[in-house]
Image (tube, grey):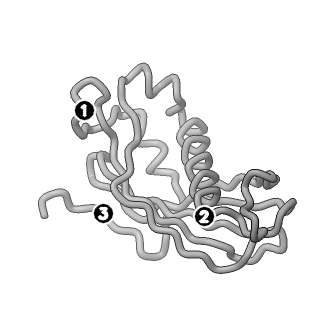
């Protein structure tokens, strides 16, 4: 199932060279992740209920085509990998400019953390739906935690 969000860019997203700030791309990707989680019954309220949150180990951004001030951008989310217990996940975001041209690709590798123990944790069964129904990348894999 495709999940994407279109955003109007803001003045604060751009640097003096009229380039979209590199961190703005990542902020929009993070917003799409949180909205995707919420759409699948794992909202900020659920994070509080289960006392956990998402964390990132890596975040890699590849810039392809410029986004101009005032343009709308569309950001999608695809699952590149997940561990059998849903503890760890790899997500890819593609960001398209207003003309529909791929502008950036953001890859994140993350997990869930218990906010009291400050340790990685297996999320509740409620997270299964969000990963089961996610659009998968062509190179989707099951993440092996035994390596």
Quadrant of the image for the N terminus?
bottom right
Position of the C terminus, as image quadrant, is bottom left
| Residue 133, image x, y percentages | 51, 51
User: Dot 3 lies on which element?
Assistant: strand
Position of residue 4 measured from the top left corner of the image (x, y, whole percent): 68, 55
Give the percent coordinates (x, y) of residue 129: 47, 42
Mark 1 falls on what kind of element? loop
> What distance separates the C-alpha of mark 1 from that of mark 2?
29 Å
Residue pointed to by mark 2: 22
In the image, taking residue 113 as reference, residue 144 lies left or right, namely left
> Would you name the residue on which mark 1 appears?
118
| Distance (Cα) linking label 3 and label 2 | 30 Å
The residue that mark 3 highlights is 142
Q: Residue at x 54, y 31 (%)?
A: 43
Task: Work out whether 114 lies above or below 120.
Answer: above
Q: Residues within 10 Å of mark 1 (few under 14, many from 20)?
A: few
Q: Earlier in the sequence, mark 3 or mark 2?
A: 2
In the rendered view, does 74 fall on the left or right side of 55? right
**Which residue occupies 64% across, 80% down?**
64
Q: CA distance from mark 1 to mark 3?
A: 25 Å
**Residue extending farthest top:** 49
Query: Which circle, 1 or 3, is nearer the viewer?
Result: 1
């Amino acid at each position: 199932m495709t999940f994407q969000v279109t955003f109007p860019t803001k003045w604060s997203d751009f640097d003096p060279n009229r380039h979209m700030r590199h961190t703005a791309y990542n902020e929009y990707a993070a917003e799409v992740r949180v909205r995707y989680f919420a759409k699948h019954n794992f909202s900020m309220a659920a994070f509080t209920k289960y006392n956990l949150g998402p964390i990132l180990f890596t975040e890699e951004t590849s810039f392809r085509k410029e986004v101009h001030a005032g343009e709308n951008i569309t950001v999608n989310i695809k699952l590149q990998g997940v561990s059998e217990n849903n503890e760890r996940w790899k997500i890819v975001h593609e960001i398209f400019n207003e003309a529909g041209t791929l502008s950036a690709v953001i890859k994140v590798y993350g997990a869930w953390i218990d906010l009291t123990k400050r340790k990685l944790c297996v999320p509740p069964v409620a997270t299964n739906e969000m990963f089961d129904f996610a659009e998968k990348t062509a190179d989707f894999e099951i993440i092996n935690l035994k390596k």
